[in-house]
Amino acid sequence: MNTNATNEKVLIGLSGGLDSAVAAALLKKNGYEVFAVLLRFWSNHNNNSINVDSYENNWENARNIARKLNIQYLEKDASKVFYKKVVVPFLNTYEEGKTPNPCVLCNPTVKWDQLIETADELNIDYISTGHYARKVHDENTGEFRLFRGRDKQKDQSYFLYRLDQAKLKRTLFPLGDFYKRDVNDIAKSIDLPLGSTRESQDLCFLSGGKLDGFLREHLPQSAFMEGHIITQNGDVIGKHSGLVKYTIGQRKKLGVSIGKPAYVIEMQKDKNRIVLGENEDLFSDELLAENCSWISQLVPSSKFQSNVQIRYKHKAAQATVIPMENKGCNVIFNKAQRAITPGQSAVFFDDDEILGGGFISAN
């Protein structure tokens, strides 16, 4: 980020939370002319599974933050595109018997697209967010490279692997070199009006609501059709109340007992069955990823070594990544990994640099 950006304009996505507020303050301190936009992702107030008060609190916080920082502020309804590009795939993935991560889709297809579209309308040079990640411009190749945030506990680069060169070129990450404790200190030092805002959660669009209620309101009744719970030998030991209520590695709320700790190790969508096993049965040394995306936008021509992260907060593990046809990758781990879950993302790292990733289709 340019620390002497006199007259350069930047549009930041302001959520009403601490991180984006401090990011906006840092941009202004560094000389940018800062504009802020709040993207409204949800406008259906008749939805019983949505806590509307939580949304409205965040929106009011965003307005107060913009006033405090004396920056230009606007709000944009992005609910239709959010529903189409995030919520619908989220629901479809659950129906397929997989476990989705909506942030991976939301960032490139909604947040970045909406920020860039708005910036273009206002003739603004850059966009920005409160993500903990770092961007580096490689002067030799001209490419923009993406790295983990300095604070490994807050690093959010896992969710950004589907950004492309055009989006990275326009993006500033003010918090990339900061630790969360420093961000908290900055917020206190300038007395930001954050109200009762809490830390962002993975399923932000629930905003305090319950996942089960959300799924029941948006999925057909057939998604909750009862089916068998079986052992690896095929013995029926119970019934489940819909595959959408379970995920790989789940141990609680299974409603059955096998005399020892039992875990969901497989979801058989075609037969509407859940397979239980022991903890050791959750380990696998291989996965298939589909619809892979690469930061450089160049598909590797041969296999390569990488540290692969299979879910947020998972410690990336050494593996061989083998690019395949049709945007696929075969990933072979040096050491078996626990609970590789279809629907989640496998993200490929070279030390702290993000190379790309894809959606896990099978283990």
Image (cartoon, helix red, strand yellow):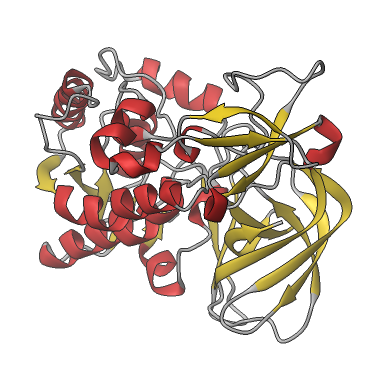
* Relative depth, front residue between 122 and 338: 338
Which residue is rendered at x = 56% and y = 76% of the image? 296
Drawn side of residue 238 relative to residue 83, left or right: right
Locate residue 19, reporting x and y percent: 39, 32
Q: Quadrant of residue 14?
A: top left
Q: Is residue 214 visible?
A: yes
Locate residue 88, reporting x and y percent: 30, 53
Drawn side of residue 3 relative to residue 316, left or right: left
* Relative depth, front residue between 135 and 345: 345
Q: Quadrant of residue 314?
A: top right
Which residue is rendered at x = 25% and y = 63% of the image? 116
Screen quadrant of the C terminus: bottom right
In this rendering, is residue 150 above or below 359?
above
Locate residue 169, reporting x and y percent: 41, 69
In this rendering, is residue 54 above or below 340?
above
**Residue extending furthest toward the right:** 334
